[in-house]
Amino acid sequence: MLFWRPGAERRMISSALLGGGLGGRGWVLNVQVPPGYARLDAERHLAELAGRAGAEGPGVGLMTAARVLDRCLAVDEGVEALVTAGIGVHGWAAAPGAGSGGPLPAGTINILVSVPVALSDAALVNAVATATEAKVQALRDAGVDASGTPTDAVCVAAAPPPPGRPAAVEPFAGPRSLWGARLARAVHRATYLACTRTAAAGG
C-alpha cells in the first residue's frame, strides 16, 4: 500500500471507488491487489485497509494490480504527480462493443496529483481532464497503442481556499493555464516513466 496524508485537509476530486467525487479529504490510499481481484465489496475493503493504516475521516481509496512500490514521481514547479501503472490490459476508450455492467479486472494507471494552490470547482474538473490528456500523451510517447486501461483512476488534490480571499482561487487548470501546464508536464513525466518501466518488466 501507498498511504499519503498531507497533514491538513485538501480539496480533492477523484474517480476513485472510495471517496470519489469532490470535497474535503485528508488522505489517499493506493492499494495493490492480486490480478483477478474480484471482491464485490471493494469499497468496504479499502475502508478497512485505510483504517489499519491509521486513516481518520474522509479520504480517497484506489486499487491496482500494478506494483505500487514501482511508483514514479515527477515534480514541475510545485505540482507533484505520483503514478502507478499496470498496462497488461489496455485499449482505446472509443473501442466498439458493449461496456461492462460490473467490475473489471484490476490493471490500472492510478494518478495522484498535488497542486499547491486553491482551484475552483470548475478548475478541479479541468485538472482531471488535463491529467487524462497528459496520460494519453505519455502512453503514446511510451509506444503503448492505447488511451489507457479500463480501470484507470485519477485524484487531484488542491490547497483549500484561503479564508476571505476568493481572488486567490485559480479559475483555470487547462493545459495552457499556469497551473494546468505544470500539472500536465508532471503527469506526463510520471506516467511515461511508470509505463516504460512496466513495459520493460512485461506487464
Image: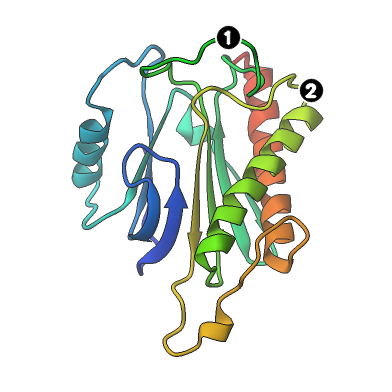
For the residue marked with disc 2, what is the amino acid? Gly
Callout 2 environment at 10 Å: few (<14), some (14 to 19), or many (20+)? few
Q: Position of residue 117 (x, y in %)?
A: 56, 72
Residue drawn at 69 percent across, 59 percent down: 180
How far is the residue under mark 1 from the one under mark 2?
Answer: 24 Å
Q: Position of residue 143 (x, y in %)?
A: 79, 23
Q: Position of residue 10 (x, y in %)?
A: 41, 65
Quadrant of the rendering where the C terminus is positioned: top right
141, above or below 99, in the image: below
Q: Quadrant of residue 29?
A: top left
Counting residues from the start of the chain, the first of labels 1 and 2 encountered is 1
142, above or below 102, in the image: below
User: Residue beneath label 2, please?
Assistant: 143
Residue drawn at 37 percent across, 60 percent down: 23
Horizontal side of residue 113 vs 11, given as left or right? right
Residue farthest along the bottom direction in this orientation:
164
